């Protein structure tokens, strides 16, 4: 064997070992950015099937996913459980009880595009909060700080630092930004909110309003958005009652909604291009009986998570 041949084989072996290192599980960026046909796929879906992905015994109110990791966020941000979607195990838990910022009901979370520092493991995390006394819903932008040699092995200690608070416009009848939740649209580098008009009890659960904002520069500690910052908005022909977790994939907004005691649990598919409700599926008819607290894309499918189970939602083929 020539020395050159031997060198090439050795180089390939070393390259394969490096490529299989545990920290490569993060993939560097959210793979939904690479999708080319998910939009067309969902336009052809007329029936869906629920498939159990894994058992999950984590109490949470929302979920965000980056790489192979789902972050399950408890109501009020008391804690965050980090779940490895490959091994299907909780690998880290963050307790946030000692944070010095006031936490409201956390109903939606998603990872953004930017990292606070280049060598951070995760991008910034955007956690939606219900309205303050002044009628502004707001979003806490959190940096996940890591220490230790290996996140995968569990040696890494994670902590949270708030880097920004984004205040949405004060809710009015016209902007319908009551109980607004925010989803980061990675493909188009923008924020999408889903909200409702709750000026009074009678119209508290009116039609759902979808609004779009630019993502503020995270270097500003506080950002107050106004109606003039809304890039576009539109109203869906469906009730906004008990909207739950959501995610955006390839210009489609997926929103879980409802729970068993109100008589329905829905899975909504919103086309952000045509600005309309594309599909609405009744999960209860498929045997789903839990609140769809978290919603995220992983491994080619949209998934919804309750406090007990992660479910994969796929197209049901005709037989």
Image (cartoon, rainbow, N blue to C red):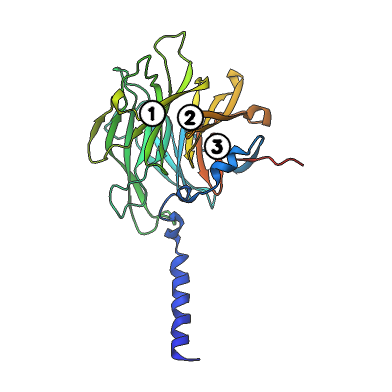
Structural crowding at the residue carrying mark 2, measured as other residues with C-alpha within 10 Å and reported as few (<14), some (14–19) or many (≥20): some
Residue 58 relative to residue 95: left or right: right
Towards the viewer: 170 or 311: 170
| Label 2 element class | loop
Q: Is there any visible trace of residue 286 in the rendered image? A: yes
Q: Residue furthest bottom?
A: 2
Give percent across and percent down for residue 63: 46, 38
Give percent across and percent down for residue 64: 44, 40
| Label 1 element class | strand
Residue shown at 42% from the left, 16% from the top: 197
Q: How much space separates mark 1 and mark 2, taking CA atoms?
A: 10 Å
Structural crowding at the residue carrying mark 3, measured as other residues with C-alpha within 10 Å and reported as few (<14), some (14–19) or many (≥20): many
Sequence-wise, the earlier of marks 1 and 3 is 1
Which residue position is annotated with label 3?
Answer: 304
Residue shown at 37% from the left, 16% from the top: 174
Which residue position is annotated with label 2?
Answer: 275
What's the mark number on residue 232? 1
256, above or below 298, in the image: above
């Amino acid at each position: 064997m020539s020395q050159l041949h031997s060198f090439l084989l050795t180089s390939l072996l070393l390259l394969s070992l490096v490529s299989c290192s545990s920290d490569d599980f993060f993939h560097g960026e959210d793979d939904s950015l690479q999708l080319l046909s998910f939009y067309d796929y969902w336009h052809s879906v007329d029936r869906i099937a629920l498939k159990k992905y894994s058992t999950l015994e984590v109490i949470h109110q929302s979920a965000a996913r980056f790489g192979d990791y789902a972050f399950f966020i408890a109501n009020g941000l008391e804690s965050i459980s980090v779940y490895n979607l490959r091994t299907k195990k909780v690998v880290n838990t963050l307790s946030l009880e000692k944070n010095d910022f006031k936490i409201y009901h956390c109903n939606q979370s998603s990872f953004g595009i930017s990292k606070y520092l280049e060598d951070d493991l995760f991008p910034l995390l955007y956690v939606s909060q219900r309205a303050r006394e002044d009628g502004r819903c707001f979003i806490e932008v959190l940096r996940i700080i890591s220490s230790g040699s290996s996140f995968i092995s569990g040696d890494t200690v994670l902590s949270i630092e708030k880097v920004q608070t984004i205040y949405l416009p004060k809710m009015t009848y016209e902007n319908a930004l009551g109980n607004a939740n925010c989803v980061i649209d990675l493909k188009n580098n923008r924020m999408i909110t889903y909200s409702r008009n709750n000026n009074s009890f009678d119209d508290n659960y009116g039609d759902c309003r979808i609004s779009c904002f630019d993502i503020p520069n995270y270097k500003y500690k506080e950002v107050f958005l106004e109606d003039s910052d809304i890039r576009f908005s539109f109203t869906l022909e469906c009730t906004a009652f008990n909207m739950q977790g959501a995610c955006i994939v390839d210009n489609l907004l997926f929103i879980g909604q409802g729970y068993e005691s109100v008589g329905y649990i829905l899975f909504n598919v919103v086309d952000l291009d045509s600005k309309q409700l594309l599909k609405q599926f009744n999960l209860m008819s498929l045997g789903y009986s839990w609140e769809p607290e978290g919603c995220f894309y992983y491994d080619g499918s949209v998934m919804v998570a309750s406090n007990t189970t992660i479910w994969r939602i796929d197209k049901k083929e005709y037989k």
